[in-house]
Image (cartoon, grey):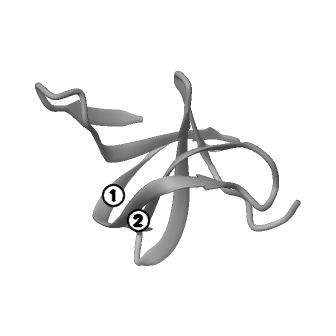
Amino acid sequence: MIVLTNKEGQLKPLYLIWEGANGKENFKIDKILDIRKSSSKVGGCGILYECYIDGKVRKLFYEKDRWFIESYRP
């Protein structure tokens, strides 16, 4: 993740960097729709950032000191 942190400590994710079979891919976070505490349907919890990424709504979570993206399948 590439994240902007303001002087109050609030986080704003800007890019998701995904390392897959084809190497690293960068996905720009087009828009943040909502930020709230929540739990993932597939496990884990933290601060939910509901975002538009590559034209799709995706759920990013910040939990303690790590980021994860909610999977479509459990």
Which quarter of the rendering shows the N terminus? top left
- Residue drawn where x is 52% and y is 22% of the image: 65
> Does the image show residue 23?
no
Q: Viewed as shown, does residue 1 lie left or right of 37? A: left
Q: What residue type is labelled 1?
A: Ile
Between 20 and 44, the one lying in front of the other is: 44
Residue 64 drawn at (x, y percent)? 56, 25
Q: What residue type is labelled 2?
A: Cys
Q: Residue 68 carries which label?
A: none
Q: Quadrant of residue 52?
A: bottom left
Outermost residue toward the right? 74
Q: Quadrant of residue 7?
A: top left
Vertical placement of 66 versus 72: above or below? above
Q: Which of marks 1 and 2 is nearer the N terminus?
A: 1
Between 47 and 15, the one lying in front of the other is: 47
**Mark 1: secondary structure:** strand
- Residue drawn where x is 14% and y is 31% of the image: 6
Q: Viewed as shown, does residue 33 lie left or right of 47? A: left
Vertical placement of 50 versus 42: above or below? below
Which residue corresponds to mark 1?
29
Closer to the observer: label 1 or label 2? 2
Would you call the spot at circle 1 few (<14 residues within 10 Å), some (14-19), or many (20 or more)? some
- Residue drawn where x is 45% and y is 56% of the image: 36
Residue 2 drawn at (x, y percent)? 33, 34
Which residue corresponds to mark 2?
51
Q: Viewed as shown, does residue 6 lie left or right of 68? A: left
Which quarter of the rendering shows the C terminus? bottom right
For the residues labelled 1 and 2, say whether their Cβ atoms are less than 8 Å apart: yes
